[in-house]
Amino acid sequence: MQKSLKDFIAREYHKLAWFVRSLIADAVDRDAEDVVQDVALRILNSPDITIPVEKVSSYVYTALRNRVIDYLRRRKDQVPVEENSLVLPEEDFELRWRLLSALDTLDAKSRAVVIATELEGWTFEELAEEWDEPIGTLLSRKSRAIKKLNAVLSKDRE
């Protein structure tokens, strides 16, 4: 069985990668190939492969589809750093002081999300679990807080 899986994956590699690309609209070639290689490695290292040989194709394609779904779920929960992040030079004490003052303009929940994610290093997944709040709520709260902080800091510079 292991040999037929290896042969199938080797023979159909480009079709498998194309299938993954068709499922991930904005995938670059590397992402699709990474998914195919990950699935192939997991299948080939699985100790108890008991599927009949005639079902190898459907088994592999189903595994790929499931892996892509996992990939998309994980990517959806990630927040782009550029949109929701504070970049703060360590030596700029004046900016740090202005930031601390600007944090005081936020409501308690927004301030807590910004401090937890930016200064304490919490992930949104960890916060959602710890605070029993949906990730989306935390993301929107932080997004609004960052916009307000940027507005306050921009106003202070004028």
Image (cartoon, grey):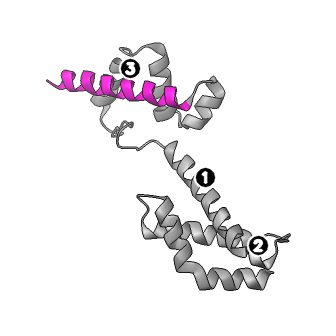
For disc 1, the marked residue is 70
Q: Amino acid at mark 2?
A: Asn
* Quarter residue 150 falls in: top left
Q: Which residue is mark 2?
A: 45
Of tags 3 and 1, the one toward the viewer is 1
Seen in the image, is 19 located left or right of residue 148? right
Q: Are marks 3 and 2 in contact (CB under 8 Å)?
A: no
139 is within the stretch colored magenta: yes
Element marked by disc 1? helix
- Name the residue tied to disc 3: 103
- Residue 80 x/y as whole percent: 41, 44
Mark 1 Cα shell of 10 Å, populated few (<14), some (14-19), many (≥20): few
Amino acid bearing label 3? Leu
- Distance between mark 3 and mark 1 Cα atoms: 36 Å
Stretch of the chain drawn in magenta = 135-158
Indicate the quadrant containing the N terminus: top left, top right, bottom left or bottom right. bottom right
